[in-house]
Image (cartoon, grey):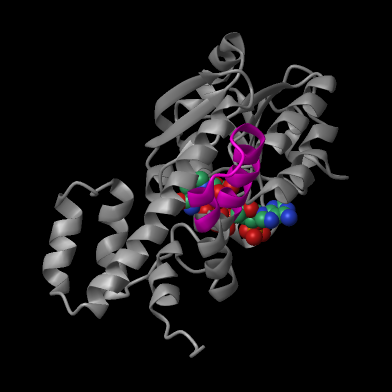
Amino acid sequence: MPRLAFIGLGRMGHGMAARTIEAGFEVSVWNRSKGKAEELIGRGARWATSPADAAIDADAVITMVADDEASQSVWLGENGAGTTAKPGTLAIECSTVSYGHALALASELRSRGLIYIDCPVTGLPDAAASGKLTLLVGAEAADLERARPFLEPLGSTIRHFGAVGSGTVFKLINNLMGAVQIASLAEGVAIAEQAGLDMTIVAESLASGAVASPQVIRHSKRMIARDFAGASFTAALRQKDAAYAVALAETLLPGVPVARAALAAYDAAKSFAPDDDEGRMIEIVSRPKPAT
Ligand code: NAP
């Protein structure tokens, strides 16, 4: 039975790890706080005492943690998976990290004999739990084929963008555009409220008109109702993705004023309520401004 180490059991990682157990892999799990692993241990996963312990004898290691700092720690820290994974092990980074980090991590893990797969994802936690994520892969084609059995339980769509790093480039563009849409939606909703429009009709119109992207459909009703129960994507994560995307954009297309405005909006949202739903942007936009 193939052996898998799964590291990072947050909103996304927990459901993804559960899918790999259901797929029949022998799974070792590690999370910074052990409580999130209990249910998976009950379903047959082995609790590893560190990422290094999880990676011993693994055929593949999958990580799903918050950001560059967390990724650096779980792969290359003192007890990182990269310290024990044997040469030939698949190193699959599913976290959304910066482009620079993805390239540096790939280079370091390759120097240790590992096969790096750049694999950020799109889809919310419910898609993670039901194996319906879209996987945005950057990898050598032959490496992707080796990784495919470990990826298939996670996603309904695997998109191969090209070499290592290319999956991350697309993911950052995708989430930057999401930040722009959500920040812009918040302003549109707030303007409609100030104008005294019937917000039921506004909601219906936004969800069915020309700007009805999945982000607009999902967030418009929640913003209008100020209903942010069950945060699935936090302001802190959206700000992190926008910051990584703007840093990448500046190396390719200096300027990007719309992207910078969205990042500034999410800087404010992160200061306001970092661990709450990204849609609370509406509350920031609607706040009375101090008199000048
Ligand atoms: P989350 O629920 O906040 O989980 C974050 C995970 O990272 C937790 O396991 C956390 O451990 C771990 N972590 C944070 N800092 C760490 C550190 N310094 N060292 C070790 N572990 C650390 O976040 P999530 O929503 O699952 O997101 C995980 C990744 O998926 C992020 O890169 C995010 O951008 C991406 N993503 C999220 C969504 C979504 O809808 N939520 C969709 C697509 C992609 P603890 O449990 O101990 O805090």
Dominant secondary-structure state across the stretch colored magenta: helix
Would you say 256 lies left or right of 32 here?
Answer: left
Would you say 203 lies left or right of 94 here?
Answer: left
Magenta residue span:
240-261
| Residue 289 drawn at (x, y percent) | 46, 84
Position above or below: 15 against 151: below
The residue lying toward the viewer, choosing from 30 and 164, is 164
The residue lying toward the viewer, choosing from 190 and 28, is 190
| Residue 97 drawn at (x, y percent) | 64, 42
Split into 4 quadrants, where in the image is the N terminus? top right
Q: Is residue 106 visible?
A: yes
Position above or below: 12 against 191: above
Q: Is residue 37 visible?
A: no
Quick check: is 59 in the magenta stretch? no
In the picture as drawn, the residue positioned furthest to the right comes out as 78
Which image quarter: residue 44?
top right
Position above or below: 182 against 2: below
